[in-house]
Image (cartoon, rainbow, N blue to C red):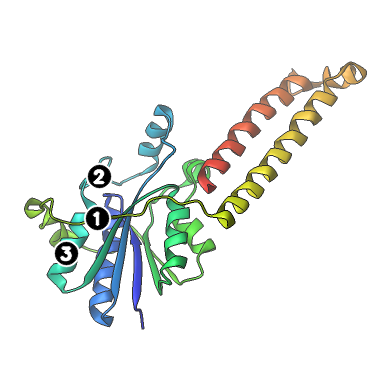
Amino acid sequence: MYKKILVAVDGYDPSLEAAKRAIEIAAQYGSQVVVIKVEEEIPLLHMEQKMEEASLKGAQQKPLTDKPLELVVAYGQQRGVSVDARLEKGGITACILKIAEDDAVDLIIIGDSGRKGVHKWYFGSVAQAVSEGAHSPVLIMKKGAVDISDMLALLPALTESAKLKEVRPVFQPAVFKQRFNFSFGLFIIFAIIYFGAVLLTSAPMKETAAMIVMGLPLAIWLGWGLIISGVVITRVYLSKT
């Protein structure tokens, strides 16, 4: 028995398919649907935005709607389902997990973006992160699993009357401590890499640093490794906080 179902939407078809499935299940069990849209506080760089678009192979390059919350509310009303729509700010995964815990939801439904290969490694998978961190069951919807044509038919009739509940950020000591420990751990990892590179390229070890590896001095490879590790650690930090 599902009393409360959580779904996140962004206007793209995988998330709208997840929202439709949430409403279908809610209609069957008499559940309430909590639908959220997350505005990320840390925007992507221009290059990252281009990579993000390229990672959505076969998906819409533009969202189907810029009013996904209103659309889900309207579809829920049509199906007789109670929908609690909220506009959130922060990290997508963090917001989903926090609301799931605070609202004691019984089921999380999330659309799979379909990222593959290097794009999935770089941007990460929200669906995978949520499924690993959630205490509630998680249903991941593959793109194309649900026909949303009837939902999209409501778009022309959408109005500005949908009331959105915006949760204002508040200071949470437990969350601050968790993020501080995570950030400090990443700092220690980077510090070890940095000082290891400094030590190896110091005067006493100049012969080792000058050693040719694959056509280049070892010191050059260490420099590139330091830059890449810094980028990776930064992206991990931004995706997890």
Viewer-nearest residue: 199 or 188: 188
- Residue 159 location (% of width, % of height): 10, 52
Find disc 1 in the rendering and name its residue.
164
Q: Are the residues at dot 2 and dot 1 in contact (C-beta closer than 8 Å)? A: no
Does label 2 or label 1 sit earlier along the sequence?
2
Find disc 3 in the rendering and name its residue.
75
Mark 2 burial class by Cα count in 10 Å: few <14, some 14-19, many 20+ = few
Does label 1 or label 3 sit earlier along the sequence?
3
Q: Is residue 115 above or below residue 152?
A: above
185 sits to left or right of 108: right
Q: Secondary structure at mark 3?
A: helix
Disc number for residue 70: none
Three-letter amino acid code at disc 1?
A: Leu
Residue shown at 13% from the left, 62% from the top: 150
Identify the residue at the far left of this view: 157
Q: Quadrant of residue 144?
A: bottom left
Q: Quadrant of the N terminus?
A: bottom left
Three-letter amino acid code at disc 3?
A: Tyr
Q: Secondary structure at mark 1?
A: loop
Disc number for residue 63: 2
Three-letter amino acid code at disc 2?
A: Pro
Q: Is residue 56 above or below residue 70?
A: above
Give the distance between the C-alpha atoms of the residues marked 1 and 3, in whole angstroms: 15 Å
- Residue 6 location (% of width, % of height): 36, 66
Give the distance between the C-alpha atoms of the residues marked 2 and 1, in whole angstroms: 20 Å
166 sits to left or right of 42: left
Mark 3 burial class by Cα count in 10 Å: few <14, some 14-19, many 20+ = many
